[in-house]
Amino acid sequence: AQPIYLADYQPPAFLVEKVELTFKLAPTTTRVLSRIRFAPNPAAVPGQDLHLDGEGLRLIAASIDGTPLTATPDATGLTLEAASLPDAPFTFQAEVEIAPEGNTALEGLYMSNGMYCTQCEAEGFRKITYYPDRPDVMAPFRVRVESDLPVLLSNGNPVESGPGWAEWDDPHPKPSYLFALVAGDLRATTGHFTTMDGCDVTLNIWVRPGDEDKTAYALDALKRSMLWDEQVYGRVYDLDIFNIVAVDDFNMGAMENKGLNIFNSRCVLASAETATDGDFAAIERIIAHEYFHNWTGNRITCRDWFQLSLKEGLTVFRDQQFMGDMRSHAVKRIDDVLTLRARQFREDAGPLAHPVRPESYVEINNFYTATVYEKGAELIRMLRLLVGEDRYRAALDLYFERHDGQACTIEDWIAVFAEAAGRDLSQFKRWYEQAGTPKVTLLEHWEDGTLTLTLRQYSAPTPGQPLKEPLLIPVALGLVGPDGAELMPTQVLELDSPEQVFTFTDLPARPVVSALRGFSAPVVLEHAQSSAESNVLLGHDTDPFARFEAGRNLARHILHGMILDGAPPNPDYLNAMRLVLVDDRLDPAFRALVLRLPGEDELAQSLHAAGHTPNPDAIHAARRRALCLLAEALAPDLTRMVNAMATPGAYNPDARDAGRRALRLAAAGLLAHADGGTKARDIFAQADNMTEQFGAWCALLAVGAGSAESLQFHRQWQANRLVMDKWFGAQVAFAQPDLAPAVAEELTRHAGFDWKNPNRFRAVIGSLGAHPAGFHQSSGAGYRLVADWLIRLDTANPQAAARISTVFETWSRYDAERQALIRAELTRILDRPDCSRDMGEMVGRMLG
Ligand code: B3K
Ligand code: ZN
């Protein structure tokens, strides 16, 4: 397959003024009738052909202004030759037939448990009918759905309906990727929201019969999102109705279709008994994210798919702000940085590294990545830090005012900031163009009351980008006295050259440098600090992220020592952890985060960055030993914490109670390494909520116990699909390393292993890929099993399979034997004649 290049962008030859669609739904013979009003695009080179994308469609009939069409479609669609087209507006009509029932790729129109639903982003609309399926073609849609199913939905406002049909009208011009249709036997939980303009909006959460008791939290999160976007960004909803539908078979989390969001049921359905605190938080975030897309994505969309971060980075940043406001900014920031490092730094350090705005792609679905999403959000966070909050808001106001109804670019985005802040941001724009995580080195020199800081930046080569230009890096920095008092509040240093020197004079004593406060830039900071200095920051820094980071640095340092030369943890570290654990002034959620040791993959990543070849078994063993030592040293305090952090009364998913449960489970989990799981077993037995039931069971699995609980969990939850995903996933995720591939293999033979369901596939195969010591077992059994299943899934659902193939992206970190084993599996995946374009691109990039 040929790559598509950003540099080749051409405006569309024709614009669309109006789309009218009729769907006559049937599992294997759905008919789609389209009536599309085209007009020549004054901004395009005249005299071009009109290409209508179409894939897997059976063309029944087509015409232009009533004259039957003679052109025959090829594998990519239908080309209408310029010479045969009027040079004035015209109407194209077509009737096609499609088979949603056999659509296992879950893209286009497909079926899930007897219901029809769609997924069009990025290029699924072409599997529904012939159309210029590109985001810079925006049009109002009117849709008629015909089916015997009771609930028939599409985008926009309902206009008319009768037995067996319904019509919907969406007045807002939109690209085809935001089209949606749903038909099924569904039940709604309904609410209302009054906008700040006084309009009443009907809100519906549609679910399968029996799931109505799990919709309240999503509905509440939606109302809070709508209010927040009005209050913080001045953005008001623009239709009479907002529908959300839960679907069991869905490739990702959710989709922001205009007025008709479609969600993976795991991202909507929640009750105290069936969902964990983490699930509740994910639901809140994703409901908000998809709602926020209504302005950042739908009303202002992307010119082409290279600009994807224009909507995704911004919408992630907005959902991060929202979650901080709803819960805790400190905890949210730490969580976000942990995710960024675990997913995006990992991506940036390997063969799949790409810029936030890629320059080419073969299959765009492969670029819905942590780089485009999470690093994209970091870039916006940096812009806000650089221009200040007021000018950030002014830039956003300008963006909404200037670009409403348009399909835009990163250049448009940078321009509103440059204008609102009166500042040249051309150097900043490199962040969108250069891949890789910059390394920032900080050197201190102290003399006669003057602290001299030398800051250097370096960006290593990434695929296709051997040389990098210096970036504009905001480094938020404060100075802390040796006693912990703040000597200098946060200043934002702007590092824009390979090396810069900053001096701080008239200091009473040598301060402890608190650098990269709030994680002010997505970089790896190299800053040698003694454990005494780290302890000062951990105990006293005014910036909660810096406090967390100081503890993390201590933990990483100790674990590196244990892994590389078996050095025992320094008693100061154990003591520092105890002080954090028992400090009741600290938010329990924060304490839970500090107590959590760096994960095995993070350790492999940091060892590799430090020039070592990580050994997954040694990492697992050392981490396990550290957990045991920590558990033994802190046992009495941990036991006290388990009791003190109980949350009596009815389950409440709010941040306060969730934080207490997080600390309680972190303490019980750690303690399990000393008490064999006695406390965890108690929590499991007494739990009246999934957070504690599941958390306690995982704590038992992690120490090789919990088989009775596994049976009980299964017995209790076998009828609940989402909880059963947890049952499948946890057994693999917490398997002892040498057993992990066999445990996963056995689960693939379980009657409940429905491998075509992405959630279930990910629970088993994805969890194995995310278990470093199990996946990287030296026999290669983990690699083989994952490759076998990726090959199988690739034939049914290439998009999901290609995504999960990223479990292999870190292969070049490991020793020669493991590298050879992985390369052999990747080659086996790639060399099949039926390897999909999605998978072909991913594996090809990984093999380099
Ligand atoms: N925009 C969708 C993701 C579509 C993924 C297509 N492969 C969900 C989101 O980011 O909100
Ligand atoms: Zn999004």
Image (spheres, rainbow, N blue to C red):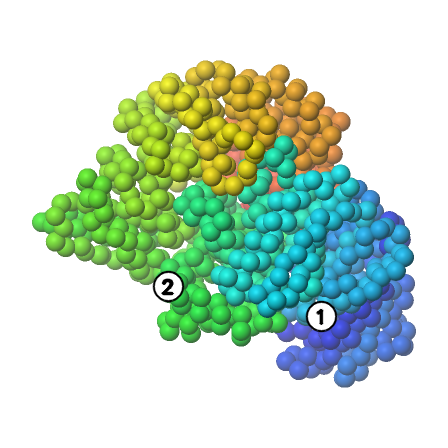
Q: What amino acid is at disc 2?
A: Gly
Report if residue 117 is visible in the image. yes
Residue at x 89% of width, y 77% of height:
66
In the picture of the structure, the residue carrying the numbered disc 1 is: 171
Q: What amino acid is at disc 1?
A: Pro
In the picture of the structure, the residue carrying the numbered disc 2 is: 388
Report if residue 9 is visible in the image. no
Q: Is mark 1 on a helix, strand or loop?
A: strand
Q: Is residue 137 above or below residue 831?
A: below
Q: Is residue 578 left or right of residue 229?
A: left
Q: Quadrant of residue 809?
A: top right
Q: How crowded is mark 2: few (under 14 residues within 10 Å), some or many (20 or more)?
A: few
Q: What element carries label 2?
A: loop
Q: In which quarter of the image is residue 731?
A: top right
Q: Residues within 10 Å of mark 1 (few under 14, many from 20)?
A: some
Residue at x 81% of width, y 55% of height:
152
Q: In this view, does 669 lie to the left or right of 29?
A: left
Q: Position of residue 822 (x, y in %)?
A: 57, 35
- The mark nearer the N terminus, 2 or 1, is 1
Residue at x 33% of width, y 32% of height:
583
Q: Where is residue 360 in the image (x, y as percent from the top left)?
A: 57, 59
Residue at x 42% of width, y 74% of height:
419
